[in-house]
Image (tube, grey):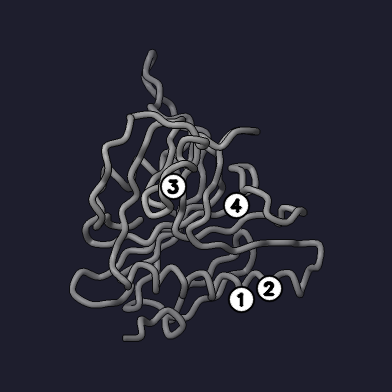
Amino acid sequence: MTNAHHQRPDLPEFMTWEQLEELPEEVAGQIELWAGRVVWLRRGPGEHQEFSNLLWNGLRHSAKSAMGIDPRQCWSVRTETNVFFGDHGRSDFVTPDFMIHRCLGKAYSYVRGDDAVMVGEVLSPSNTDRDIEAKKARYAGAKIPWYWEVKLRGEHSAIESVRIFALESSHGALPAGVRPLHPANYLLVGEWTPKDSDGIHFDHPFVIDLSWADLEFLT
């Protein structure tokens, strides 16, 4: 999740994908459509892109290892690629910083929510809790099984923590007449920091091993 630096033009509150495609790329690339509503992305400093790429590289290596062990598996790892919701149309989408999805079987296909198995966001110090929770709710509503949050340190170009969440589509007992705001949510299932571990080790959606050394920012 990035931090915007460019002046935003005056746009309508709602747009279609077709209207978005008519905008200049430098403008359209800053926008997500949430059920047609224009939501501006936050574009951040170089650290944001660097850590997204480092995570992509590490996850891709783990994906290739998993497919080598079991050729029946087929995974793709992406950065800043749209995830479209629903069975058709493109006017409802979000853009995670990195993600894993099932192989689509056809070149140049669009990724749908049902294809994605993990999405992740690199959080800069400027990201607000409201921004984070709103986007997380979108991912949960699409029933994407795994969500990662990578928090960057405020004073150094380094990762402070990596947290992994699992989708929870049921809820505990609530008083009569009380319903959860969202039908699905994420539960924290793992947290790693450079201070208390040698890297990130997780078994879903395949065995993932990322060392902190592989995730270091190079100036």
Residue most extreme to the top: 177
Please determine whether, in this image, residue 28 is positioned above or below residue 153. Answer: above
Which residue shows up at 61% across the image and 76% down it?
61
Cα separation between marks 3 and 2: 27 Å
Dot 1 and dot 2 residues touching (CB under 8 Å): yes
Dot 3: within a 10 Å radius of its alpha carbon, few (fewer than 14), some, or many (20 or more) residues? few
Read off the residue under disc 4: 117
Cα separation between marks 4 and 2: 16 Å
Which residue shows up at 81% across the image and 62% down it?
72
Dot 2: within a 10 Å radius of its alpha carbon, few (fewer than 14), some, or many (20 or more) residues? some
Which residue shows up at 53% across the image and 58% down it?
99
Quadrant in the picture for the N terminus: bottom left
Which picture quadrant has residue 73? bottom right
Which picture quadrant has residue 20? top left
Quadrant in the picture for the C terminus: bottom left
Please determine whether, in this image, residue 133 is positioned above or below residue 171. Answer: below
Question: Disc 1 residue type?
Answer: His
Question: Disc 3 residue type?
Answer: Leu
Q: Position of residue 26 (x, y in %)?
A: 38, 54
The local secondary structure at tag 2 comes to helix
Residue 187's tag is 3
Query: Front-most of 197 and 130?
Result: 130
Read off the residue under disc 1: 61
Dot 1 and dot 4 residues touching (CB under 8 Å): no
Dot 1: within a 10 Å radius of its alpha carbon, few (fewer than 14), some, or many (20 or more) residues? some
Question: Which of the marked residues, 3 or 1, is nearer the chain's N terminus?
Answer: 1
Please determine whether, in this image, residue 213 is positioned above or below residue 12. Answer: below
The local secondary structure at tag 3 comes to strand
Question: Which of the marked residues, 4 or 2, is nearer the chain's N terminus?
Answer: 2
Read off the residue under disc 2: 64
